[in-house]
Amino acid sequence: MLAWQVERLGPPPEVLRLADVPEPAVEAGTVKIRVEAAALNFLDILLCLGQYQERPPLPFTPGAEVAGTVIEAGPGATFKVGERVMALPVLPRGGLAERVVVPEDRVYPVAPGMPATDAAAFLIAFHTADYALRHRARLQPGEVLLVHAGAGGVGSAAIQLGVAMGARVLATAGGAEKVDLCRRLGAELAVDYRQQDFVEAVKEATGGRGADVIFDPVGGDAFDRSRRCVAPEGRILVIGFAGGGIPQVPANHVLVKNYSVVGIHWGYRARLQPAAVRDDHLHLLDLYRRGTIRPVVFREYGFDRLVEALDDLAGRRSYGKLVLRRAT
């Protein structure tokens, strides 16, 4: 079968190649999935470069999110052949392949009629945003939610979920197209951080009080400046560090202004509380079925166009999620 492989570390265009590899075998508690679509994440780039916190043995196949159909089930598996699913493959056998074997505890059902592209782009973005807003921040109706990188995969999910929870949603993004997307998703105010100071914009929009919850997948300067516009007793949610800088938290400022800095690691929750995550998944699928939420997909690429897609992702020429589709 065909799979994208990294045989040495380096820039994706230099180290990725489409190779013919052995068919993976199912084991107890696993299922084999015929991959119809695979979503891309920045971690795929970091894996190629050897800069991700996990360094799988070479050669490996990247790809953290897939959607497809179960074509074989190992002993003890409860998913049946023919079921459509979304899944989180385990390195070094990632999802950028024609077929992938995944432990059943990392496989989730899709909504009836859900396109493969939506299913592939759904899991990480919506589960991360839901865990952050509903469980960790306990966002309440009427509270002000500020979402950084609102046009990104997880940011666009956070805007939609914030609106669904009855919050006043503000957002930041870079460039007119991305700002317009945030507004279309439901943000009442979207700030182009390249052109405007988001701190002053948030203060103006809230009468000087600031945002009750700040959803920050950027880190660096965005985190530091967020401390200037968080409301008293507010919550800054640390989602990630897409901006490249890992900020330091001044405990004296946290104390004086009475706000909380809250860590968000959905993957850790999924390992510790799998039953709770499956309940969350049913909640999110219900929102999807009702048309309340939907993944934002920038573009679908053919399976052979991985390098081009990762170049668009690395160059920040995209928004939402990028998805590879296989011809079926």
Image: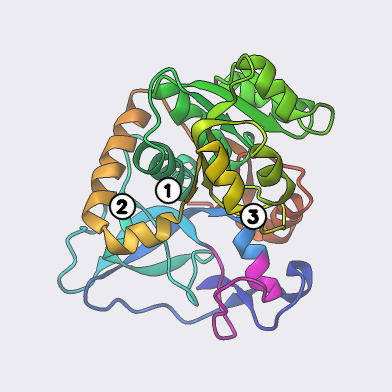
Image coordinates for residue 85, horizontal then vertical, percent: 33, 51
Give the label on residue 38, or none.
none
Q: Is residue 323 visible?
A: no
Q: Which residue is rendered at x = 46% and y = 27% of the image?
A: 162
Packing grade of label 2 (10 A; few <14, some 14-19, many >=20) is some
Alpha carbon separation for disc pair 1 and 2: 9 Å
Residue that carries the numbered disc 2 in the rendered image: 108
Q: Which amino acid does label 2 sit on?
A: Tyr
Task: Tell me the SS state at disc 3.
Answer: loop
**Which is more toward the observer, 90 or 136?**
136
**Which is more toward the observer, 211 or 46?**
211
Residue that carries the numbered disc 1 in the rendered image: 123
Tag 3 and tag 1, C-beta contact below 8 Å: no
**Which is more toward the observer, 3 or 135?**
135
Q: Which residue is rendered at x = 47% and y = 82% of the image?
A: 22
Q: What residue type is labelled 3?
A: Phe
Image coordinates for residue 68, horizontal then vertical, percent: 40, 53
Tag 1 and tag 2, C-beta contact below 8 Å: yes
**Which is more toward the observer, 75 or 175?**
175
Residue range highlighted in magenta: 46-63
Task: Tell me the SS state at disc 1.
Answer: helix
Task: Tell me the SS state at disc 2.
Answer: strand
Q: Earlier in the sequence, mark 2 or mark 3?
A: 2
Image coordinates for residue 243, horizontal then vertical, percent: 72, 52
Marks 3, 1: nearer the viewer: 3
Vertical comparison of 281 with 213: above or below: below
* Relative to 147, 8 lies left or right: right
Q: Which of marks 1 and 2 is nearer the N terminus?
A: 2
Residue at the outermost right position: 195
* Relative to 42, 27 lies left or right: left
